[in-house]
Image (cartoon, coloured by chain):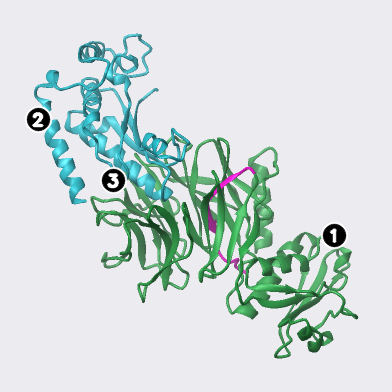
Chain colours: A green, B cyan
């Protein structure tokens, strides 16, 4: 599915613009890793050197960038193992590896390539995974990400997010672009380009559309754009300001913030802009609404208590419950995929930091130190949070694991990047 | 919240007090009370032709640097959307202009400094724009004459990162249709 989407994406982009300039790519580096990283050896696949772009290099980069794996030297084992039954556990245990990845690649008559790999646990001496793919060389990168996903899931229990995409806003001088790139920063594509601000990119649950706010009409207007066709529609362009879109988990509704009836209030609507229904009526700011994963409630920011805090409203009963109580500024709620808590922005002594809240224990954990951290977005496996921060006058992105141990920095040269949004898991 | 409501009530009450003796209301603007009221009178006179502020007439009070109407910005304190006393004459002058030019249309653009959530700042800027509109409507401007929008922190006038820059960016701008 992800492969044909990329083909459509390229088609859509070429159809929309007369040329495709090279975009500064996001580079991602680990700046803090988990203390207990899993040592894993990735042996170059048999015949992999036949092609200029291999697969195992990308697999290794994905796994080590996650902060949960440490690559063990795989050189110098002769003969080089290509199948699980070639793997000698003692050899790899001597190198302190817990797991080994071996595989092979075979050109097929129609120009495609057969890729297969085995993941072997050399401690328990069992094969954890055995997969094969038939792909064109142009799909090697995507295949490598799929393989990394399988390894990640087998070793950690959580789905890998190496095949996902991230959206973000890139600003260079007066120019704003809504970019979509692979989760490792590769293949950046410009989806929208404007001389007026863009913000709040939000993926539809099926990954085919993005909602966003654009100031091209000299006021904030909410658009929904197809990543498949490039076509877009202004779904909220009422009098006053239109902003803060968020999708329902089933993709049939959006919640937006509108000032058309006074103040900033939350409204539900269909993805084509029809069916506008007000959620609450208040004299306060009610904004930044997002659906909970079960689709039954909205979590939102409101100043109804005197300072910006986060609340939850049940859409059936319209009962409202306050969620944050520490400090005088808690905004930008993002519920976790498992529904058990949320990430948000917490201000402490003037510093804006990313924090998490457990709904059951009401315990808050501050994950970053600011001073200007904003717009968190949670990876679809619930393990990483990407966010924006200001570093030395220019905006950069960063990511932190939900236990706070793994830290990454994402930079694009000469570009102010902000407003990251992590896309959904691919549907395959 | 209560304090803000209280302050708003006081603000409304003060405006109410000064509405009747309009000509004697203190004018903080340095362009001078005589110039201001003179501009308003001539503005009202020519307003019969067309309230459209895009007119290039040299006498257009909206663009006359001697008129308070050429002043278009209201500044706010941190985390606040209360219109301070020093800006009430400016707000009042524009409200009177709208009242005497029924075809005139205005947009009030609310802005915030760079700190905090982008979306929350759009709402805060909106609240600042709405505060000035509310005051103008109370003073006789028509609700349909004024649109309020927010730029949040997206379009700062001062790109700096200090208190001075932040103060300059916490601001409503008044823009007439056609400008």
The residue stretch that appears in magenta:
A414-428
Q: Which residue is mark 3?
A: A263
Q: Which is nearer the N-term, disc 1 or disc 3? A: 1
Q: Position of residue B114 (x, y in %)?
A: 43, 43
* Subunit that carries the residue with mark 3: A
> Height in image: A322 above or below A273?
below
Q: Position of residue A282 (x, y in %)?
A: 24, 53
Look at the numbered disc 3 and give the secondary structure of its residue. loop
* Subunit that carries the residue with mark 2: B
Q: Which residue is mark 2?
A: B17
Q: Position of residue A176 (x, y in %)?
A: 55, 41
Residue A186 appears in the picture as rendered? yes
Residue A52 — which label? 1
Q: Residue furthest top?
A: B58
Viewer-proximal residue among A254 and B14: B14
> Height in image: A294 above or below B64?
below
Name the image quarter holding residue B140: top left
Q: Is residue B149 left or right of residue A152?
A: left
Alpha carbon separation for disc pair 2 and 3: 26 Å
Name the image quarter holding residue A220: top left
Q: Please state which of the two labelled residues, at mark 2 or mark 1, is closer to the viewer.
A: 2
Q: Is residue B130 left or right of residue A17?
A: left
């Amino acid at each position: 599915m992800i492969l044909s989407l990329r083909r459509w994406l390229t088609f859509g982009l070429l159809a929309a613009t007369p040329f495709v300039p090279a975009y500064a790519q996001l580079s991602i580096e680990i700046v803090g890793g988990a203390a207990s990283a899993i040592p894993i050896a990735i042996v170059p696949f048999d015949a992999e050197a036949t092609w200029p772009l291999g697969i195992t290099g990308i697999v290794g980069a994905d796994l080590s960038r996650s902060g949960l794996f440490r690559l063990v030297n795989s050189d110098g084992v002769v003969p080089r193992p290509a199948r699980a039954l070639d793997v000698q556990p003692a050899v790899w245990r001597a190198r302190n590896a817990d797991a080994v990845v071996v595989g092979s690649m075979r050109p097929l008559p129609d120009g495609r390539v057969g890729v297969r790999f085995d993941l072997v646990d050399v401690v328990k001496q069992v094969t954890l995974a055995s997969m094969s793919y038939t792909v064109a060389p142009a799909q090697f990168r995507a295949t490598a990400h799929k393989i990394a996903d399988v390894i990640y899931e087998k070793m950690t229990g959580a789905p890998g997010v190496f095949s996902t995409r991230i959206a973000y806003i890139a600003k260079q001088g007066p120019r704003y672009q809504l970019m979509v790139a692979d989760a490792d920063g590769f293949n950046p594509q410009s989806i929208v380009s404007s001389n007026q601000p863009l913000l709040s990119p939000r993926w539809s649950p099926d990954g085919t559309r993005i909602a966003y706010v654009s100031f091209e009409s000299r006021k904030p207007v909410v658009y929904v754009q197809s990543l498949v066709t490039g076509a877009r529609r202004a779904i909220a362009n009422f009098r006053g300001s239109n902003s803060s879109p968020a999708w329902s988990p089933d993709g049939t509704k959006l919640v937006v913030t509108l000032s058309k009836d006074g103040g900033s209030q939350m409204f539900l609507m269909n993805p084509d802009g029809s069916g506008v229904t007000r959620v609450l009526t208040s004299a306060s700011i009610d904004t930044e609404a997002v659906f909970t994963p079960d689709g039954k409630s909205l979590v939102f920011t409101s100043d109804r208590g005197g300072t910006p805090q986060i609340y939850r409203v049940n859409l059936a009963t319209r009962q409202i419950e306050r969620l944050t109580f520490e400090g005088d500024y808690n905004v930008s709620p993002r519920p976790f995929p498992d529904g058990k808590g949320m990430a948000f922005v917490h201000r402490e002594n003037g510093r804006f930091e990313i924090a998490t809240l457990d709904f059951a224990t009401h315990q808050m954990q501050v994950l970053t130190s600011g001073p200007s951290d904003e717009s968190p977005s949670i990876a679809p496996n619930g393990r990483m949070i990407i966010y924006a921060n200001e570093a030395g006058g220019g905006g950069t992105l960063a990511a932190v694991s939900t236990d706070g141990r793994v830290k990454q920095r994402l930079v694009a040269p000469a570009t102010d990047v902000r407003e990251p949004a992590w896309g959904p898991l691919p549907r395959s | 919240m209560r304090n803000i409501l209280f302050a708003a009530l006081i603000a409304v009450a003060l405006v109410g007090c000064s509405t009747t003796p309009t000509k004697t209301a203190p004018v903080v603007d340095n362009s001078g009370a005589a110039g201001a009221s003179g501009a308003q009178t001539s503005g009202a006179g020519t307003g019969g032709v067309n309230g459209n502020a895009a007119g290039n007439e040299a006498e257009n009070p909206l663009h006359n640097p001697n008129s308070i109407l050429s002043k278009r910005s209201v500044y706010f304190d941190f985390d606040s959307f209360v219109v301070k006393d020093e800006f009430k004459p400016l707000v009042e002058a524009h409200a009177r202009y709208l009242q005497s030019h029924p075809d005139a249309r205005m947009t009030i653009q609310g802005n915030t400094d760079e700190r905090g959530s982008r979306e929350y700042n759009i709402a805060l800027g909106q609240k600042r724009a709405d505060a000035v509109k509310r005051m103008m409507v109370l003073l006789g401007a028509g609700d349909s004459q004024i649109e309020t929008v927010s730029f949040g922190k997206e379009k700062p006038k001062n790109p700096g990162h200090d208190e001075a820059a932040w103060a300059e960016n916490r601001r409503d701008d008044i823009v007439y249709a056609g400008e």
